[in-house]
Amino acid sequence: TGHGSIDLVVRAVKEGAEHFLTKPVELPALLVILQRLLENQRNRQKQLAGRSREARDFVDPFVGTSRAIKELAEQAERVVAAETAVLIQGETGTGKGVLARWIHGRGPRADEAFVDLNCAGLAREFLETELFGHEKGAFTGAIVNKQGLLEIAQRGTLFLDEIGDMDPQVQPKLLKVLEEKRFRRMGDVRDREADVRLIAATHQNLRTGGAEKKFRSDLYFRISAFQLAIPPLRARGEDLPMLCRSLLSRLCADLGRREATLASDAEQALARHPWPGNIRELRNVLERALLLSDRDVLSRRDLRFDEIGGEADVPAYDADLTLEGLERAHIERVLQDQGGRVDVAAQRLGVPRSSLHQKIKKYGIVLPRN
């Protein structure tokens, strides 16, 4: 307009105007305004898309009906709305990260950032710069300023996975941040605010670590105001069928294939497996079966268990078996696992393929069909 007034500006903004310009309009300024408007629009679309994806990718950490998982859900509900630091304990693959995201997504900081860092295997210098950031010139190679995760997580949640592996020299610095709510970038002299909620996770016994001087006891008591223990998969066998259905549904959607189910022999094999890798291992086994089979009903022969987990269907020890009987049973079991592929079974048994063929002929073993 060529007749700008405060009343006109207010009315225009109320009716939806993004900007109000008076003539003559400077074209370079107009270009900058339009570019910023388009960028803001793209950012809003990305946020909406991100929220839609997060809703679609949401994983329920409490799938099942076992007493152990119900108790965990009840305990998590009690702490979700608090600002209290939470320590999640559990074996590798039990879903500690999934539970941490669930707590964040249900808590008062859900609209803010969820920032995670795995402390395992990180050198002290790298861990410090990741957490606190650094100023240009703070050390050799620091050619630009770098934000730390504490800044990125401001007003949100910081999830430190495998905190038991944190370098002992970094632990007192983290403790100071939690107590004073302030930190400094490496090479800086100015304090910065640290308004974050901490969720930590570990598969270790941090009390023992404190006794062995590997993990500071004062930091342990600071991060463990509320503790959640995720039960291993072997302790919640009744949840396995429901977990399999949930994982298969998600995996089929991710792989773009029809819904798949498990045959009874596959369910029995899964129920007998010890699951040292817990839910992560279960997901791997099911995903591998879907990738290697185009059938809608997965059978026992479609399952490929991790070697570290041992056999899923090793029968109870029979003292009446002869050595030949035991050898035959083991060969049959391995051939069944490998879908009748003699070359792969021979590698697993540690014998030449020709020797395995001789054993198959000797014992009259019928090869399973793929």
Image (cartoon, grey):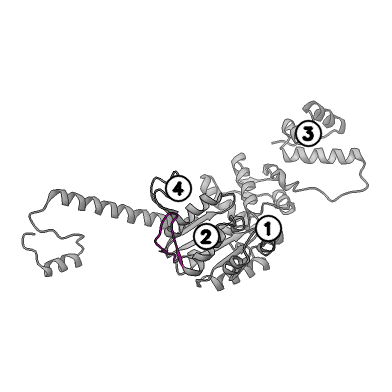
Residue at horizontal 52%, vertical 52%? 127
Q: From the viewer's perspective, is the residue at label 1 or at label 2 nearer?
A: 2
* Mark 3 or 4: the one toward you: 4
Side (left or right) of 164 relative to 148: right
Secondary structure, mark 2, is: strand
Q: CA distance from mark 1 to mark 2?
A: 23 Å
Q: Does label 2 or label 4 sit earlier along the sequence?
A: 4
- Would residue 93 appear left or right of 185 to someone viewing this image? right
Q: Nearer the viewer, mark 2 or mark 3?
A: 2
- The residues bearing labels 3 and 4 have C-alpha atoms spaced at a distance of 52 Å
Q: Which quadrant of the rendered structure holds the N terminus?
A: bottom left
- What element does badge 4 sit on? loop
The residue lying furthest to the left in this view is: 3
| Residue in the picture at 26% in, 51% down | 38
Instruction: Say which label, 1 or 2, has the lower sequence index.
Output: 2
Q: Identify the element where label 1 is drawn.
A: helix
Amino acid type of the residue that numbered disc 1 sits on in the rendered structure: Leu
Q: Position of residue 78 (x, y in %)?
A: 56, 73
Residue type pointed to by label 3: Gly
Residue 148 in view: no
Q: Which residue is mark 3?
A: 350
Question: What amino acid is at disc 2?
Answer: Phe
Q: Which residue is mark 1?
A: 233
Where is 366 relative to 190, above or below?
A: above
